[in-house]
Image (spheres, helix red, strand yellow):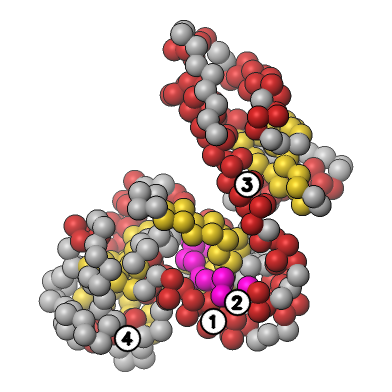
């Protein structure tokens, strides 16, 4: 689906339309396109809004957590909410008006509609798959092959994790997810997933350790670990390249000054590879010593043999990278050390 409302004088229009006018015009256009966009109802929540209605208050709370990493019953920012209803299931699409206005200033209405349509299509697909219905049935057997683990920065997600299953590792969280869909056409890799609620784990009556181990095995199968000695190898490598955990791997040792990158075949959320069984220990064997771990994003970790670089220098590079890239890709703001003596990774306080 594509909706484009370009005008011959779009650039002039962008210059003239103020933020408040944009919000009013956006609501008008959304109402005109209601049938085409296929949503049930629209609501506008203004900055500072609160409500005595429990459903509306829930939307305000969730929006603050999702967009601002804060808990509050008073909305921070202006948002348009589109409700989609399918049978007894209702889904909401949230749109940050400031963000849409910025898109409008940079690319006109076509940029705004591209964002809105993509979000609505994603939401529709999510509802059609019916994963929420599957979760609510509380049948472990139906979900166990869909469970996987994803690494997130704990501080950036601490509020939304309260009702979900995760394990804390320093300033990171390993979070239990359910895979909704995984599509890769060679040009674009789209993964849809949802966090596993604590209530489901309680309803299953199965030990958390068993569920966690199963999810970790699933994750390993979905995305086996890889190590690349040259950053250029990260660009579309063949499947077998960098398979350092394989019995016939051509990576038998690591030069002291090498800075290998550890990720997965999928690379998306590839930093989870460091937490696969045996991976940290195997890397220590390859280095022949302890080593520093820099989680330079959710997709990868970079390693330095102990004694080859000062950990403060590694920390400085991590902070520089975190400032450069999208905050959603940040995994850690710390340096970690794997010690062969106790076969454990610990966070360094620098």
Q: Earlier in the sequence, mark 4 or mark 3?
A: 3
How crowded pointer 2 is (Cα within 10 Å; few <14, some 14-19, many 20+) is rated as some
How crowded pointer 1 is (Cα within 10 Å; few <14, some 14-19, many 20+) is rated as some
* Mark 1 touches mark 2? (CB < 8 Å): yes
Q: Label 4, label 3: how many angstroms apart (C-alpha)?
A: 41 Å
Q: Earlier in the sequence, mark 4 or mark 2?
A: 2
Find the magenta span and give its range.
143-155
Q: Earlier in the sequence, mark 3 or mark 1?
A: 3
The one of 304 and 141 positioned closer to us in this rendering: 141
Q: Secondary structure at mark 4?
A: helix
Is residue 102 something that shows in the picture? no
* Mark 4 touches mark 1? (CB < 8 Å): no
Residue in the image at 21% along x and 85% along y? 248
The one of 187 and 51 positioned closer to us in this rendering: 187
Residue in the image at 48% along x and 21% along y? 108
Tell me the residue that label 4 is attached to.
281
How crowded pointer 4 is (Cα within 10 Å; few <14, some 14-19, many 20+) is rated as some
The one of 28 and 33 positioned closer to us in this rendering: 33
Q: Label 4, label 2: how many angstroms apart (C-alpha)?
A: 27 Å
Tell me the residue that label 1 is attached to.
214
* Mark 2 touches mark 3? (CB < 8 Å): no
Q: Which of the labelled discs sits on residue 144, or is there none?
A: 2
Please say if 306 is above or below 333.
below
The question of residue 47 being in magenta is answered with no
Q: Label 1, label 2: how many angstroms apart (C-alpha)?
A: 7 Å
Q: Secondary structure at mark 2?
A: helix
Residue in the image at 71% along x and 24% along y? 31
The one of 309 and 50 positioned closer to us in this rendering: 50
Relative to 257, 98 lies left or right: right
How crowded pointer 3 is (Cα within 10 Å; few <14, some 14-19, many 20+) is rated as some
Q: Secondary structure at mark 1?
A: helix
Residue 193, given in percent of the width and then of the height, sits at 56, 60
């Amino acid at each position: 689906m594509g909706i484009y409302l370009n005008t011959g004088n779009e650039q002039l229009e962008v210059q003239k339309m103020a933020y408040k006018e944009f919000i009013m015009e956006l609501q008008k256009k959304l109402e005109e396109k209601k049938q085409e966009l296929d949503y049930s109802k629209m609501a506008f929540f203004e900055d500072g809004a609160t409500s005595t209605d429990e459903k509306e208050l829930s939307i305000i709370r969730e929006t603050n957590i999702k967009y601002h990493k804060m808990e509050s019953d008073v909305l921070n920012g202006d948002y348009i909410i589109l409700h989609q209803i399918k049978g007894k299931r209702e889904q909401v699409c949230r749109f940050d008006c400031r963000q849409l206005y910025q898109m409008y200033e940079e690319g006109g209405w076509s940029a705004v509609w591209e964002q809105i349509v993509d979000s609505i299509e994603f939401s529709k697909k999510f509802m059609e798959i019916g994963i929420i219905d599957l979760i609510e049935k509380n049948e472990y057997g139906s979900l166990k092959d869909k469970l996987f683990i994803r690494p997130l920065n704990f501080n950036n997600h601490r509020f939304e994790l309260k009702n979900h299953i995760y394990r804390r590792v320093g300033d990171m969280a390993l979070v239990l997810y359910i895979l909704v869909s995984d599509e890769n056409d060679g040009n674009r890799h789209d993964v849809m997933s949802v966090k596993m609620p604590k209530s489901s784990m309680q309803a299953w009556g199965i030990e958390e350790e068993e569920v966690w181990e199963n999810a970790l095995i699933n994750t390993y199968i979905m995305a086996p670990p890889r190590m690349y000695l040259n950053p250029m190898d990260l660009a579309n490598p063949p499947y077998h390249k960098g398979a350092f955990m394989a019995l016939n791997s051509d990576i038998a040792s690591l030069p002291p000054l090498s800075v290998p990158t550890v990720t997965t075949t999928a690379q998306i959320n590839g930093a989870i590879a460091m937490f696969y069984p045996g991976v940290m220990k195997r890397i220590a064997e390859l280095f022949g010593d302890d080593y520093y771990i820099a989680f330079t994003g959710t997709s990868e970790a970079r390693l330095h043999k102990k004694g080859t670089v000062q950990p403060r220098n590694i920390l400085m590079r991590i902070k520089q990278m975190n400032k450069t890239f999208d905050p959603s890709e940040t995994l850690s703001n710390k340096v970690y050390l794997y010690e062969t003596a106790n076969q454990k990774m610990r966070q360094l306080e620098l």
